[in-house]
């Protein structure tokens, strides 16, 4: 079966997953409309039965599983069908059983253990065919250098496991082009389960990956410091010297990307008389390119407004709107209010309220 849009969900480590995981994945689902879901593994943490030391302040195995099952119930509602890859944390129960000579036949299936239906299937690794005919190899994590895995298997490769790695690398010879994608993770770094990592210089990257028509995508607004995903075509203040993305602007600092986003919203307000969420989003995300109704619903939920509520030209009204747009565009909203407000004030500075200047 050919797959047009494949969503690759990163390590969740439930119940110690990031509190915004479901909102994040919901936004990614709305934006990319995946027809295939691959969970890269480590869906469970099993901190309580780890082979390594575990924190005494955390939950028992039973409590850990029961809380994780609540998360998986919601995740299954979002993704009734999912491929899940075998992983070091996800398989801890069976690894412990093997160590102590307990036959696996005594255990429930993964589906029964997690309380999910037959639509979730487990694999040691997985090969799928994209809509362009390209075969793609999926594994939890074999080597830190994902291109080494791609070269070894002779296929483009996606893997998780390495929480601090969120990237796409390419390699080619005269006959072929291979890529490897690392998908980051979806963990809650504030949890005591990850206290071991606090002294390390590298930090986990919250993210996920998407493959569209055989091409890998990491939500790029964050990477481009362009959280509004503004396309090339305007000579914005703060553009980076090198525009490495063929479609979207790359800014030198995120504050300039936020400025550009807000500047566009000001043009909508003063030049096009767009004062409410419905009119603003209908212009920002037109039906020709987006599911506009879903976008409006999402923004209204995040801002606590109704579609036709009038917005004042103020921080109080526009800050929640900008934050909601950033989350919808990127699947997450990682910036502080202080940074966003700084970018918004830069947009207001010198803006001619009777002009379309950007």
Image: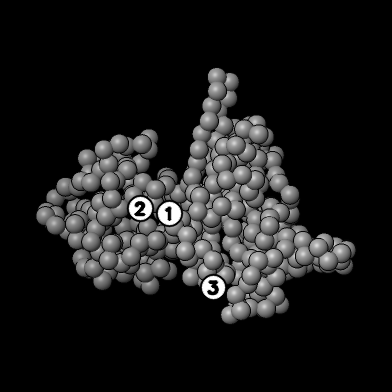
Which marked residue is nearer to the observer: mark 2 or mark 3? 3
Q: Are marks 3 and 1 in contact (CB under 8 Å)?
A: no
Camera-side residue: 137 or 257? 137
What residue do we see at 58% from left, 25% from top? 176
Compared across the picture, whether 23 is left or right of 250 comes to right
Q: Is residue 130 visible?
A: no
Q: Earlier in the sequence, mark 2 or mark 3?
A: 3
- Foreground label between 3 and 1: 3
Q: Residue at x 87, y 64 (%)?
A: 101
Which residue corresponds to the image point at 68% horizontal and 55% vertical from the top-left? 87
Image coords of residue 1 (percent x, y): 70, 39
Q: Position of residue 243 (x, y in %)?
A: 32, 37
The one of 33 and 61 positioned closer to us in this rendering: 61
User: Contact (CB < 8 A) between labels 2 and 1?
Assistant: yes
Q: In this figure, which colouring scheme has been used for the structure?
A: one colour
When the figure is inspected, residue 190 is found, relative to residue 140, above or below; the finding is below
Give how far apart the Cα atoms at labels 3 and 1 are: 27 Å
State the residue position of label 1: 330
Q: Position of residue 89 (x, y in %)?
A: 67, 61
In the picture, the disc for residue 192 is 3
Residue ID for mark 2? 227
Determine whether the residue tagged by mark 2 lies in a helix, strand or loop: loop
Task: Identify the secondary structure beneath mark 3.
Answer: helix
The crowd level at tag 1 (other Cα within 10 Å; few <14, some 14-19, many 20+) is: many
Q: Position of residue 111 (x, y in %)?
A: 75, 63
| Viewer-nearest residue: 319 or 271 | 319
Which comes sooner in the sequence, label 2 or label 1? 2
Q: How many marks?
A: 3
């Amino acid at each position: 079966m050919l797959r047009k849009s494949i969503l690759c969900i990163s390590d969740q480590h439930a119940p110690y997953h990031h509190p915004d995981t479901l909102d994040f994945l919901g936004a990614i689902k709305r934006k990319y409309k995946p027809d295939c879901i691959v969970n890269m593994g480590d869906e469970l943490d099993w901190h309580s039965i780890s082979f390594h030391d575990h924190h005494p302040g955390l939950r028992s195995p039973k409590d850990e599983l029961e809380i994780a099952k609540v998360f998986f119930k919601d995740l299954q509602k979002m993704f009734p069908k999912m491929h899940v890859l075998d992983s070091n944390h996800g398989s801890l129960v069976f690894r412990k059983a093997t160590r102590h000579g307990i036959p696996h036949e005594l255990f429930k299936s993964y589906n029964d253990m997690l309380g999910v239906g037959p639509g979730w299937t487990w694999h040691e690794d997985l090969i799928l065919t994209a809509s362009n005919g390209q075969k793609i190899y999926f594994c939890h994590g074999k080597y830190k250098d994902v291109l080494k895995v791609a070269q070894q298997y002779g296929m483009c490769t996606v893997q998780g496991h390495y929480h601090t790695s969120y990237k796409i690398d390419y390699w080619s010879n005269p006959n072929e082009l291979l890529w490897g994608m690392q998908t980051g993770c979806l963990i809650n770094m504030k949890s005591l389960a990850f206290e071991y990592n606090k002294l390390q210089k590298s930090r986990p990257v919250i993210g996920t990956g998407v493959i569209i028509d055989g091409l890998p995508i990491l939500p790029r607004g964050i990477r481009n410091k362009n959280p509004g995903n503004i396309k090339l075509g305007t000579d914005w203040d703060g553009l980076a010297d090198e525009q490495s993305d063929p479609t979207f602007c790359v800014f030198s600092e995120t504050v300039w990307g936020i400025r550009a986003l807000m500047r566009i919203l000001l043009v909508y307000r003063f030049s096009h008389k767009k004062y409410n969420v419905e009119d603003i989003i209908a212009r920002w995300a037109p039906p020709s390119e987006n599911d506009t109704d879903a976008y409006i619903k999402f923004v209204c939920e995040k801002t606590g407004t109704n579609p036709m509520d009038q917005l004042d030209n103020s921080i109080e009204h526009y800050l929640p709107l900008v934050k909601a747009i950033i989350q919808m565009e990127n699947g997450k909203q990682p910036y502080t209010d202080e940074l966003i407000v700084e970018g918004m004030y830069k947009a207001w500075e010198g803006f001619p309220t009777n002009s379309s200047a950007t």
